[in-house]
């Protein structure tokens, strides 16, 4: 005995026009683009490329000051580089000191919460919370650093830097942006042509 399949019924692993089941937010939309990453927006035009972020920011600020719809612009950093700046040597004592500072903030917060509901001396509750937090933070900070065995004996801060910043606008407002850009002087610096 054979059963006739219903072509309009949903089948796992098979995609089709109106045969997808609805999700918790309603009907799912068919995928757009190539399926890798967010869907592409409207076409854009590069107004100019600048060697530093403040120059690109000044361009967008100039457009905003002249009532240009800046929600249709973007600053795109290219040739990104991760820079980790070493701030100093990290010893167990310094790790304990950093931990004490972090713990003190947490202890202060908890002390304030308990202090709100205290009938007696609320200031003492806050100070006890601060001291206990600092002590436990110092203990945990020192122990955590000692357990690394000297594999990372420095503190650092990471940042992303771009080699060039391009200001782009949506294609249908590009001419308006170019006209407004004609009035902007970047202190002797002109926009570099985008590559």
Image (cartoon, helix red, strand yellow):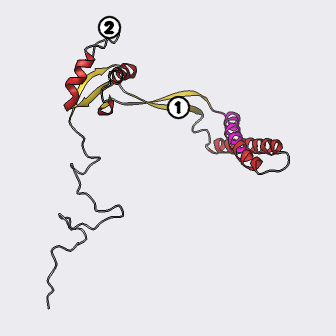
Mark 2 highlights which residue?
188
Mark 1 highlights which residue?
157
- Compared to 84, does 37 lie above or below? below
Q: Which image quadrant for residue 72?
A: top left
Indicate left or right for 16 with 163 as reference: left
Query: On residue 56, which mark appears?
Result: none
The answer to whether any part of residue 136 appears in the image is: no
Q: Nearer the viewer, residue 144 or 46?
A: 46
Q: Nearer the viewer, mark 1 or mark 2?
A: 2
Q: Position of residue 109 (x, y in %)?
A: 69, 44
Q: Position of residue 11 (x, y in %)?
A: 23, 72
The part of the chain drawn in magenta is 90-107
Q: Position of residue 81 (x, y in %)?
A: 39, 30
Q: Nearer the viewer, residue 21 or 172?
A: 172
Which element type, helix, strand or loop, lies under badge 2?
A: loop
Q: Dot 2, how many residues are within 10 Å of its Cα: few (below 14), some (14-19), or many (20+)?
A: few
Where the C terminus falls, by quadrant?
A: top left
């Amino acid at each position: 005995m054979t059963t006739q399949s219903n072509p309009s019924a949903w089948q796992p692993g098979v995609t089709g026009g109106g045969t997808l089941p609805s999700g918790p937010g309603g009907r799912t939309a068919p995928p757009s683009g190539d399926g890798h990453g967010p869907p592409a927006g409207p076409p854009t035009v590069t107004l100019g490329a600048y060697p530093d972020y403040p120059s690109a920011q000044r361009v967008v600020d100039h457009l905003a000051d002249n009532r240009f719809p800046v929600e249709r612009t973007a600053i795109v950093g290219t040739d990104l580089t991760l820079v980790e700046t070493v701030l100093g040597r990290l010893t167990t004592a310094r790790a304990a000191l950093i931990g004490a500072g972090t713990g003190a903030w947490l202890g202060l917060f908890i002390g304030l919460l308990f202090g709100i509901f205290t009938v007696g001396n609320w200031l003492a509750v806050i100070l006890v919370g601060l001291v206990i937090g600092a002590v436990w933070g110092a203990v945990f900070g020192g122990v955590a650093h000692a357990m690394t065995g000297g594999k990372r004996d420095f503190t650092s801060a990471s940042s992303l830097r771009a080699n060039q910043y391009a200001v782009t606008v949506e294609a249908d407002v590009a001419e308006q942006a170019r006209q407004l850009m004609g009035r902007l002087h970047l202190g002797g610096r002109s926009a570099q042509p985008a590559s």
